[in-house]
Image: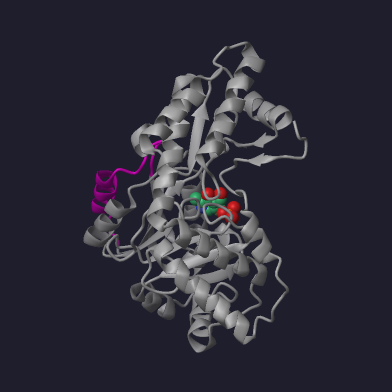
Amino acid sequence: MLLNQQFLFTPGPTPIPERVQLAMNQPMIGHRSQAFSHLLEDVSQKLMPIFGSKDPVLLLTGSGTSALETAAANVIEENDHVVVIVTGAFGDRFANICEAFGANVHRLTIEWGKICEPEQLEDFLNSLDYDIKAVFATYCETSTGVINPIKELGEITKRIAHSLFIVDGVSCIGAVAVDMESWNIDILVSGSQKALMLPPGLAFIALNENAKRVIQSCNTKRFYLDLNRYLASYENDKSTPFTPAVSLISGALEVCHMIEEEGLEQVISRHQLLKRMMREGLKAIELLTFVADEYASPTVTAVCPGNDMANPIKKLLQEKYSITIAGGQKQLKGQIFRIGHMGYCTPFDILKVLSALEMSLHDLDGRNVFGKAIKAAEEAWKQYV
Ligand SMILES: Cc1ncc(COP(=O)(O)O)c(C=O)c1O
């Protein structure tokens, strides 16, 4: 083994393509320069199809949670009623953030591992007798690996609550389809270190006119995260109100070029293939996936191996095979492990993890499943090409 060759399969951060790394190593430019304005405008516009947005995408410096907080801080006023769909740890975080801004939060809590079915939201909204300011949802719930039916949830939000629909797309934007207008999404946020193939540190916010009106009239105290400042700076001279993470934005331009070159449609179908290969491989070696196929995210797969094997497998992958994966969060700690397969990830990468899993099972309990997961994954790949 090459001891210094590490393989990163966490559901964020994710591997960075070399050309993106190089783009981030360019000499620094001033953030009040023409060169930076051109860079920002270019990136904000090239991100539009990736976010399914009709408007340029705003860039803030901060992790994904800063994007969630920005969405809440610019919309929620004390005592507003909001609905948060909680399908796991990140939906729960969205609800906690809304509470921190003084909202009356109505949590629609779903069993972990399941999606929010459209009828569940419909019944929940019908059961509430309040003026709802916004419905918050998580597109890919990274803690369980489900992908929520955002299009259907958006339609119900508009039809019943007539409110804003705000979506956390942190762990899937750049790997999945989305169309803000026809899916009724008013604010869509994401972060850099997942399918967008960048280091952590950039937050992305796409928003429509509807959202802008609410944000303009929102009286909640905020400063760094005040979207009005970002909108004004962008409109005035294609700048940001505060010093931005210039290098990450240079990297983001290269990411946009890569997505354009591969083609967004192809990027999306590559992620579907990665998901299928992973799931077929796991099934072939009888490792149970936490989520049913029809709910499964194309960017992250949660596995429950049983017999307290989740942590030993994770540890062995790290120590013997230099593969980093993630464990379970909150109540799933020790019960599942999670494999990220988003962004700079190819079918061969899936074979790599599956092969290490086959070896680990043998190491841990003598199970001989050599080649089984690989074969199943290759067959899934073959059907695709
Ligand atoms: C769906 C989702 N939302 C929000 C976050 C929070 O992002 P960060 O850790 O960058 O603050 C994450 C991170 O894993 C996530 O997966």
Extent of the magenta region: 109-130
Q: Residue furthest bottom?
A: 236
- What is the x, y in percent for residue 246? 65, 72
Q: Is residue 162 above or below residue 277?
A: below
Q: Residue at x 40, y 42 (%)?
A: 272
In the displayed structure, 2 sits above or below 368; it is: below
Quarter location, residue 271: top left
In the rendered view of the protein, which quadrant contains the N terminus?
top right
Hey, which residue is sitting farthest right in the picture?
3
Residue 23 at x, y percent in the picture: 65, 65
Identify the residue at image location x=41%, y=80%: 217
Residue 91 in picture, x, y percent from top left: 46, 49
For residue 112, say whether it is visible: no
> On screen, 297 above or below 106?
above
Residue 294, picture quadrant = top left
Of 170 and 266, which appears nearest the observer?
266
Magenta residue check for 113: yes
Q: Nearer the viewer, residue 94 or 308?
A: 308
Q: Position of residue 313 (x, y in %)?
A: 63, 25
**How is the structure coloured here?**
one colour
